[in-house]
Amino acid sequence: MKKLGTKTQFAVCIRNDGCEDLEVGKVYRVLADELAARDGYIRVIDESGEDYLYPADYFVPIALPEEAERALLAAFSSLSST
């Protein structure tokens, strides 16, 4: 997986072998974690609303238009506050 920068990042899940908290085809917010990346993992906020490490090859990073990114961040924020 290509390296993710410091800007808010998103990735789409392309597989979820044994990971019940991931949905294939869903967009997840990625949190920067250089140590995890060195070991082949990515830190995402999953279906539980918490951030966890998953194999990086379960995801493909995506670039979103700024408006879409703002909308997703707002949606994620409202989910985590409920």
Image: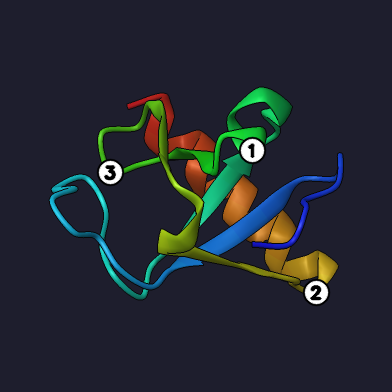
Instruction: Give the crowd class for mark 3: few <14, some 14-19, many >=20 residues within 10 Å.
Output: few
User: In this rendering, which labeled residue sits more in front, label 2 or label 3?
Assistant: 3
**Could you tell me which residue is drawn at 13 percent across and 48 percent down?**
20
> Which residue is denoted by mark 1 in the rendering?
37
Mark 2–mark 3 CB contact (< 8 Å): no
Q: Position of residue 9 (x, y in %)?
A: 71, 52
Residue 15: which quarter of the image? bottom left
How far is mark 1 from mark 2, CA to CA?
A: 25 Å
User: In this rendering, which labeled residue sits more in front, label 1 or label 2?
Assistant: 1
Mark found first going from the N terminus, 1 or 2:
1
Q: Nearer the viewer, residue 34 or 26?
A: 34
Amino acid type, label 2? Pro
Quadrant, the N terminus: bottom right
User: In this rendering, which labeled residue sits more in front, label 1 or label 3?
Assistant: 1
Q: Secondary structure at mark 3?
A: loop
Q: Position of residue 36 (x, y in %)?
A: 58, 29
**Could you tell me which residue is drawn at 80 percent across and 74 percent down?**
65
Q: Position of residue 71 (x, y in %)?
A: 64, 59
Q: Secondary structure at mark 2?
A: loop
Mark found first going from the N terminus, 1 or 3:
1
**Could you tell me which residue is drawn at 69 percent across and 69 percent down?**
68
In the image, residue 73 above or below residue 57: above
The residue most toward the front is 39
> Which residue is denoted by mark 3 in the rendering?
47
48 sits left or right of 26 in the view: left
In the image, residue 75 above or below residue 44: below
> Which residue is denoted by mark 2 in the rendering?
65
Q: Position of residue 54 (x, y in %)?
A: 39, 42
Q: Secondary structure at mark 1?
A: helix
